[in-house]
Image (tube, grey):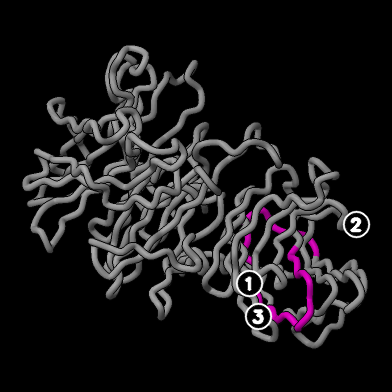
Amino acid sequence: MYYRPEESAAADVIPFYKDGAFQLFYLRDFRDAGRCGEGTPWYLLETRDFVTFAEKGEVISRGSREEQDLYIFTGSVFERDGSYYIFYTGHNPHFPKEGKKQEVIRMAVSSDFRTWKKDPAFRIDAPDCFEPHDFRDPFVFYNEETKKFNMLLAARVNYGPSRRRGCTAVAVSGDLITWEVQEEPFYSPREYFTHECPDLFRMGEWWYLVFSEFTDKCETHYRMAKSLKGPWLTPEYDTFDNRNFYAAKTVSDGTDRYIIGWNPTTDQDKDFADTQWGGNIVIHKIVQGEDGQLFAAVPDKIKESYCVPVRYREGYTIGTVLKYQDSWRIGRPDGFSSLDLGDLENSCRLSFDVTFRKGIRNFYLFLNSDKDNEAAYYVGIDPVMNRMTFDRWPRKRSDYPFMLESERKTEVLPDVTYHMDVIKDGPVLEVYFGGKYAMSARMNEFREGTFGFAASYGEACIENLEYRTLVK
């Protein structure tokens, strides 16, 4: 379901919609320089439903160690008059030692969208007003107001505290070939080290600027404005997911807009290990609220693909569990209660409605649990802290009980029924709460077990449980 190339990882995705299909260019990380050589090329996937993917192979090859584009890093795809342009980052980490710039903007051109030719003469360097080695991730769009092409860039101003120099720079062109980088940044809040993978789109009366940062929480953020000139406002919920969804960019089929990032693998596929660059491709559907805020929901085709019912069985319980036809009331005011519902398929979808009674401290969905519910992964809803959490027990450091694996801000109100969709595909876990909030996670070490529900110091009501898997 969540694509990952064999013996490698998918990093930044550059999506483009063409001829009724989503064209997903992506950075392929082979993770084996000894066997595959150094550097990162662009590969291409094609999909119409985000469920099945056709591999189209390599589209832009990496350069040599002596060339600027040893690593073909992130960029964008643009169509004009039947020709296609890829603007990308040429990155060579060996160049600064030789007095050369680590990153410059390069271009490749195609007439058929399949065969791409690099333009050796095309090059955009960071001007003196920006740092020379962090200058990447070009995103090109046509500005209807100025009748010019604009290119957004991840850049850093050359003054001020180092961790606060990040900005979104902008270059301007009349022909896509000759560009002038503007001294004044497009957006510069002085908050982050840099603004990676910029993306821009309009929905209704709002413009949205999307970027990713690794200074604070390693998340993809967005800002909103009524004009390209700003001011760029920070909404209450300014992320689409948590730190397990990064470098995300958007694409529209003319009806719906989707945001596509990657769920990172971890070192040696271990829980609590360092996250790596790249992993599995993950797609969320963007939902716009009445006030213009953006949220994330499960794409319809992904949800519909899990259509084969699986029978669950009621088993081990702790505390108070009451059954009412197709619903359960779980919980007590003075402690913990849980219900085990049997074995969990390797690839499956759990969908249900849940209502939290006033005063409840925590609600949990446990996954890949052992028979005694001692070892498991936990998706938590915390009404007290208004957050959704992911955790594992036992933790690597049991003397750090306050350190959750990950969390994200979520509005949770008492006596309101919320729908949840939970999709498990091998180690990849995607959780959707209330049709608005998404949370990505990874379950590396416990690969099988049971699932169920639990509540602490209060009551939750679970209804309309669906347990489904893919057609085999």
* Quadrant in the picture for the C terminus: bottom right
Earlier residue among tags 1 and 3? 1
Q: Nearer the viewer, residue 44 or 148?
A: 148
The magenta segment? 342-365
Amino acid at dot 1: Ser
Residue 388 lies in what quarter of the image? bottom right
**Count of labels in the image:** 3
Q: Secondary structure at mark 2?
A: loop
Amino acid at dot 2: Asp
- Main SS class of the magenta portion in the image: strand
In the rendered view, tell whether residue 339 sits above or below residue 163.
below
Residue 337 lies in what quarter of the image? bottom right
Label 2 belongs to which residue?
A: 372
Q: CA distance from mark 1 to mark 3?
A: 19 Å
Q: Residue furthest front?
A: 160
Residue 355 is one of the magenta-drawn residues: yes
Label 3 belongs to which residue?
A: 413
Q: Residue at x 81, y 69 (%)?
A: 454
